[in-house]
Amino acid sequence: MKGTPDFPQCGFSGRAVQILDKCGVEYAFVNVFEAPEVRENLKQVSNWPTFPQLFVGGELVGGSDIMMELYESGELQKLLAGATKAGEQQV
């Protein structure tokens, strides 16, 4: 994400934080402004050009727009609950 959960530095990162907080899950984050190597390499690895990027169980879910669509449909909550039940430590 751009920034931190306490201080998101773009609206999309802020929205991602709000969505994950509403889901009540613990999550890890990387501030791409403080980790330029992650910022450059993750775009290539994930084939997703923008930030934030949500990964669950090591798989790319998408950015904040996709997160919002999944949240509104209830699918994100199911995905996150499944990851928690499967013993995933981080979202």
Image: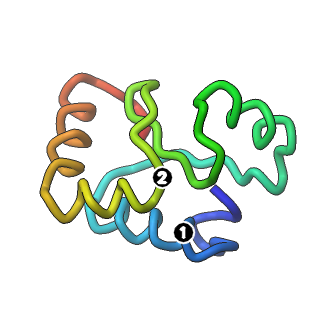
- Left or right: 57, with 37 as reference point: left
Task: Look at the picture and state if 16 lies above or below 39.
Answer: below
Q: How far across and how far down the image is residue 34, in percent?
A: 84, 52
Using the image as rendered, state which of residue 25 and residue 47 is in the foreground: 47
Image position, residue 46 (x, y; %): 58, 30
Q: Give the residue pinned by disc 2.
A: 63
Q: Is residue 42 above or below residue 5?
A: above
Amino acid type at mark 1: Phe
Residue beneath the point at 22% across and 39% down = 79
Q: Which residue is at 54% across, 68% downward?
A: 12
Query: The residue tagged with tag 1: helix, strand or loop?
Result: helix
Give the Cα separation between the discs numbered 1 and 2: 8 Å
Q: Position of residue 53 (x, y in %)?
A: 54, 47
At mark 2, the secondary structure is loop
In this figure, which residue is indicated by the disc labeled 1?
Answer: 12
- The amino acid type of the residue labelled 2 equals Gly
The x and y percentages for residue 10 are 65, 73
Sort mark 2 into few (<14), some (14-19) or many (20+) by Cα contacts within 10 Å: many
Rendered image coloring scheme: rainbow
Tell me which corner region of the image, top left, top right, bottom left or bottom right, holds residue 60.
Answer: top left
Q: Are the residues flagged by discs 1 and 2 in contact, CB closer than 8 Å? A: yes
Q: Quadrant of residue 70?
A: bottom left
Horizontal side of 57 relative to 10 (left or right) equals left
